[in-house]
Image: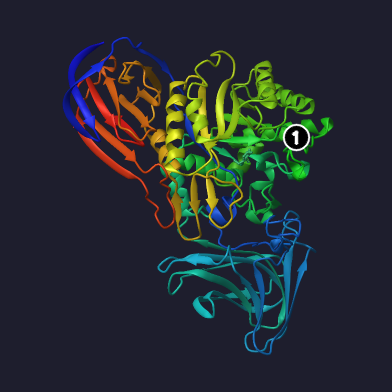
Amino acid sequence: MRNKKVSALLCGLILSTNIAYTQSVTIASKEISPILVGAFFEDLNYAADGGLYGELLQNRSFEYTPSDIYDLRNTSNNGWNSFTAWHFLRSINSIGRVSVETVSPIHPNNPHYIRLRVLTEGESGAGLRNTGYDGICVNENETYKFSVFIRTEQCGVLKIRLTEHSQILSEQEIEIDGNTTWTKYECQLQPLHSSSEANVEVLFPQKGTYDIDMVSLFPTKTYKGRANGLRKDLADCIEALHPQFMRFPGGCLAHGDGLDNIYHWKETIGPIEQRLEQPNIWRYRQSRGIGYHEYFQFCEDIGAEALPVVAAGVSCQNSARRGGDGQEIIPTDEMDTYIQDLFDLIEYCNGDTSSVWGRKRAENGHPTPFDLKYLGIGNEDRITPEFSERFKLIVTKLRERCPEIYLIGTSGPFHSGEDFEKGWVLARETNVWAVDEHYYVRPEWLLENLHRYDDYPRTGPKVYLGEWASKGNTWWNALCEAAYLCHLERNGDIVVMASYAPLLAHLQHIQWKPDLIYFDKQAVYPTVNYEIQRLFATNKGNRVWTGIISDEEGREADATSCVTDSDNQRIFIKMVNTTEQEQIRNINLAPLHPRNKKAVIEVVSGERNAQNTPQNPQSLQKTITSKKVRNTFSCTLPPYSVTIIKL
Ligand code: AHR
């Protein structure tokens, strides 16, 4: 140890002082994963339908069924049906009848539709009203695209209205031309004023029989203006996270609630009226308007590698609420067909347009390949003999046919225990590229386990920390996650990907907490945990260093990391203070040979229990300053803070 006059940095201020630092720490560096921090997307908490998916109408194709149980805690919500979110409208003196039909639907995947018979016109006929997801949020000055499929012998008009209670916010007439095949009609609506309580009405003023299906309303301003697009504020918020990869469609939703609920990608692509809707394991409906194609498109749009996770030939062990005992298996003689679907998925992403599935991708609007590199097989499954048999078969066949794809295995729902051990044994036996670990833990657990990966073997499969979070959305939780992320970076040679889970939650429809981003129909509320994920995803490198940041005793400081980015020749130093006292960190930049000593210093701090809420969406203090630093300097970390120094 020796004393040296260096610069001390206090909340962005550089002070000259005498501090002690050591030369006994070992300076070393290693390459780390350039895609360490990503996102985990699952249609849970109304993340897709009623959330990221831009569709504003609920139950647009009348497919809800009584077996979709929305809220297990509230039995009055049970018993959804084709008419959920719909109301029958009848003007004064009109007589109408409404029924749910299934003969000659638009497509066999979309079997239910409404037959409306206007028997006596009365004042203005009859029709239907949709209430959206707890009322529709519309903005003045924005336009909305309405569409509907109709089959009728009747010629006449159709009135489309946006309403708020009894007030008409916008009205359009569409001429219908007596077409006895299903025909799509469209118009645009612009509301008189903004509302979060709007409804959509489809009115049939003339006598006649009308078959009605796929009634839809989208904002024109979707994310990147795409048709069948995403809700812009939510998509922007995910984009701003800069995830380097995105996992989808789950989670448990991927392997599903029993065999017939496994997520089959082919059912989710193509024209939306031909997709197969399904209940999800979270007990509500998925329209699959966001299907595999949209997931790949979104990944491309936000610059994230796509990471689909498919079932390993078995359903979720919690199927039918059988608490860990409900794993159902695809019969052996059906496994070839199942695996063929996986080959086809890879062809859909990577095949050229002369291939069958590459051509379908082009038909769906994306002629260039999506360039899929990663595939997860299984989701925290119980490692039963049946699972292992199917997993091995899938890995062997995929490796033979598509050796370029990085395959990821699974290791149960916890950070240790029987499935964890067995999952790792199986992963080593099959030599998959990485193993998906999952854990939701106390924040303190993260601090107690900062060094978890230091001793992981450096040969064999790598780690994908596919689902992780500390249990809570306070700044204390986020700080512990930040400290842990520093150590994931330090072990970024073996931990190649990590995704906080779950990503999204609608404040009125939560099945799983905590989450990274909350929202309601009007606004988006990123959590303090989001702030941490964003900081680590945006300040990333491809090489991690030790021996750069030391504590007051001159030891390598925990809860810190230093990464460099060879492409942009940048240095990122991250330091987390999880205590209520200031902490001093000594920094020695000399081994990094910084070309530029101008540092940008970002400090985020807050009360231990700070939490972003709709009432207080910005509960943290943030400062960004820039200073010239010397090769060695010290830095005072404020209580409960994260400091990032960028050169
Ligand atoms: O992230 C929520 C759920 O947690 C996932 O669906 C599942 O994989 C895990 O149990």
User: Compared with residue 220, is residue 530 higher up or lower down, i.e. above or below?
Assistant: above
Quadrant of the snapshot with the C terminus: top left
Q: Residue 369: name its quadrant.
A: top right
Q: Position of residue 487 (x, y in %)?
A: 45, 24
Q: Residue 430: name its quadrant.
A: top right
| Whether residue 369 can be seen here | no
Residue nearest the observer in this picture, 574 or 185: 574
Question: What amino acid is labelled 1 in the image?
Answer: Val
User: Compared with residue 344, is residue 270 higher up or lower down, i.e. above or below?
Assistant: below
| Whether residue 125 can be seen here | yes
Q: Which residue is mark 1?
A: 314
Q: Report the image quarter containing ligand 1.
A: top right
Q: How is the image coloured?
A: rainbow
Mark 1 residue crowding within 10 angstroms, few (<14) / some (14–19) / many (20+): many
- Horizontal relation, residue 231 to residue 429: left or right: left
Quadrant of the snapshot with the N terminus: top left
Residue extending furthest toward the front:
581
Q: Position of residue 277 (x, y in %)?
A: 69, 53
Give the total of numbered labels: 1
Residue nearest the observer in this picture, 586 or 118: 586
Q: Position of residue 20 (x, y in %)?
A: 24, 17
Q: Residue 55: name its quadrant.
A: bottom right
Mark 1 and ligand 1: say if the CB distance to the nearest ligand atom is below 8 Å: no
Residue nearest the observer in this picture, 191 or 150: 191
- Horizontal relation, residue 70 to residue 238: left or right: right
Q: Residue at x 23, y 37 (%)?
A: 625
Q: Position of residue 229 (x, y in %)?
A: 52, 53
User: Compared with residue 156, is residue 635 higher up or lower down, i.e. above or below?
Assistant: above
Q: Residue at x 70, y 64 (%)?
A: 76
- Horizontal relation, residue 505 to residue 427: left or right: left
Q: Secondary structure at mark 1?
A: loop
